[in-house]
Amino acid sequence: MDKIIIEGGHPLKGEGKISGAKNAALPILVSSLLADGWNTYTNVPDLKDIESTIMLLSKLGAKIEREKDTVRINASGLNNYEAPYDLVRKMRASILVLGPLVARLKKARVSLPGGCAIGARPINLHLKGLSRLGASIDMEHGYIEAKADCLKGNTIYFDITTVTGTENIMMAAVLAQGETVIRNAAREPEIVALSDVLNKMGADIKGAGTSKITIKGVSSLKPVSVSIIPDRIEAGTFMIASAATCGDITLTGCEPDHLEAVIHKLSLTGADITIDESAMRVLGSDEIKSVDVKTLPYPGFPTDMQAQFMVLMSVARGLSIISETVFENRFIHVSELKRMGANIKVSGNTAMIQGVRRLSGAPVMATDLRASASLVLAGLVAGGTTEINRIYHLDRGYQSIEKKFARLGAAIKRVKG
Ligand code: EPU
């Protein structure tokens, strides 16, 4: 298996470009199942999760062409309604095909995703939503079987805001009969991006980005050409890297409006952030201040940035408290950071971080994407060599992370295993 080796202690300098958003691209590629004909998607990031999605869609009968950051999908030949265990196991977001398959083929058989490193992550709300639209749901042999001759609009109230749950129901409801109202809908920019794409395909969705989304069903959709929005989590990860290494980097191709909570908290730590349309310059301070953070659904501070922010707090002056309220087990990076010299105590969903002067490089590994990203940041800050193992997780969600950091002056390389 490949490894990443980092010699820490170099301040990042220069300019880097942000890729398209993984979590916007996944549902948007899946939305191609809702129409016949060729859809064209540009600014698609080159990631393992995108490969897995393409594999799944082609297994369902779609034709796919890919060249650089452009992916073309034609689902006219959609003929298979099963998402097998092997693919769902690799990527939980495969559950996103459930809604579109029931809408198009009247049935779906999708492997149950099961838990993962960051929590139990049930899909009860996806299923509840689909059954409110009239689908019958059965579970057998580790698979969900959903059937509906005709989906019918209804009001769906989510007890907890769920990002992929909201996306799944939106994609089922666009072709349902009548009106669907999603209450307590997720408000993430990725929901707005999907809604924009579906509306361009001919859907009638209003309210995306608010907690009430109204969808009037239409009889068919047409294919589209769209560009994927910038990845706010990749941008945030690089911003923190600049702040933590006392760097001076400019990120281009960003959407600063999607990063308000991160920009606010980073500024409080002493980083100087200037925004010029889609470019952001982040100038680190040589004295990082401690700042408390609580993760929340958008527009709150993203859980996908929690591990990275913890690295910054590990080298800040004083004590900070980070509370994780979205996932129940998202502190798996803590034990690895401690091995690098961080002073962190965890109690329930709260971590107390007493900043230390310096982290020290060590061999580490993580079992989740953002935890792995936090270890890269820790390696960039630490004295000496850090060796990151199991980088499979990083490749799921960051396009060539080592090349992007190397271009900014980091001493980082991938070693083929
Ligand atoms: N939840 C339920 N029941 C459900 C669905 C969710 O109880 O049916 C709970 C979850 O267990 C969790 C909370 O609701 O405690 C929120 O989970 P959500 O459904 O919003 O998460 P998700 O849709 O599975 C997406 C992102 C994650 C990101 C979360 C939260 C995609 C493909 N994934 O996951 O991204 O952390 O929203 O913002 O969009 C990542 O990119 O590293 C990543 C994990």
Image: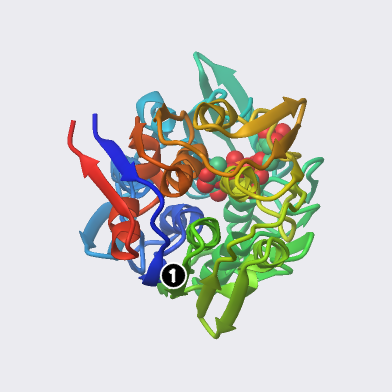
Element type where label 1 sits in the image: loop
What residue sits right under mark 1 in the picture?
A: 222
Residue in the picture at 51% in, 80% down: 278
- 241 with respect to 295 (left or right): left
Q: Quadrant of ligand 1?
A: top right
Residue 8 location (% of width, % of height) = 38, 47
- 78 with respect to 157 (left or right): left
Residue in the picture at 48% in, 49% down: 104
For the C terminus, give its image quadrant: top left
Residue 184 location (% of width, % of height) = 80, 52
For the N terminus, give its image quadrant: top left
Seen from the viewer's position, the closer of residues 108 and 150 is 108
Q: Is residue 293 above or below residue 240?
A: above
Q: Is residue 83 visible?
A: no
Q: Is residue 209 visible?
A: yes
Q: Hey, what amino acid is under mark 1? A: Lys
Quadrant assignment, res 361: top left
